[in-house]
Image: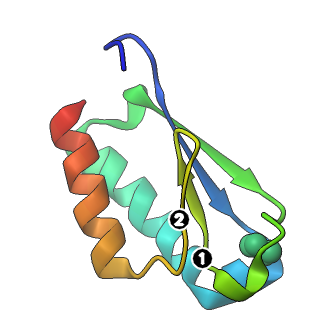
Amino acid sequence: MPKDEKTIITVCMGSSCFARGNAEALALIEETLQRTGAADRVELRGSRCENKCAAGPHIRINGATYSQMRPEELKALLNRLAEEA
Ligand code: FES
């Protein structure tokens, strides 16, 4: 991805994904973006539902969907993104 393009992170904030962990995931993403200085290179979006609630929580990063995302996996993914940015 060209350096001037923003990474787009979409967090499903539908009730199922919210209850399954995306409330905490959103806080973790925001904290990580601030701490790493990557906030200006990332566009953070929310969605209402990805229509696959049973496999949630879902987070999309540049169109790639990550299902059943756990905090440890999300932390590793965010750290990789921060290093690449
Ligand atoms: S609430 Fe996230 S997929 Fe439906």
Instruction: Tell me if the residue at label 1 has its CB under 8 Å from ligand 1.
Output: no
* Image region (quadrant) for ligand 1: bottom right
Identify residue type, mark 1. Ala
Give the residue at x 57% y 53%. 60
Task: Tell me if mark 1 has few (under 14), some (14-19) or many (20+) residues whose alpha carbon lies within 10 angstroms of its own.
Answer: some
Q: In which quarter of the image is the N terminus?
A: top left
Give the residue at the far left of this rendering.
Answer: 83
**Helix or strand or loop: what does disc 2 sit on?**
helix
Q: Is residue 17 left or right of residue 32?
A: right
Give the residue at x 52% y 38%. 62
Q: How many marks?
A: 2
Task: Tell me if mark 2 has few (under 14), some (14-19) or many (20+) residues whose alpha carbon lies within 10 angstroms of its own.
Answer: many
Q: In this view, does 72 lie to the left or right of 49?
A: left
Whole-percent x and y of residue 25?
Answer: 49, 71
Note whether 18 is above or below 63 in the view shown.
below
Instruction: Tell me if the residue at label 2 has its CB under 8 Å from ligand 1.
Output: no
When asked about the image quadrant of residue 41, the answer is top left
Q: Is residue 81 left or right of residue 46?
A: left
Whole-percent x and y of residue 39?
Answer: 39, 36
**Mark 2 vs 1: CB contact within 8 A:** yes
Note whether 38 is above or below 20 in the view shown.
above
Q: In which quarter of the image is the C terminus?
A: top left
**Helix or strand or loop: what does disc 1 sit on?**
helix
Whole-percent x and y of residue 55?
Answer: 65, 83
User: Label 1: which residue?
Assistant: 23
When asked about the image quadrant of residue 84, the answer is top left
User: Label 2: which residue?
Assistant: 26
Identify residue type, mark 2. Leu
Q: Distance between the residues labelled 2 and 1?
A: 5 Å
Give the residue at x 52% y 81%. 68
Q: In this view, does 19 lie to the left or right of 32?
A: right
Give the residue at x 58% y 75%. 22
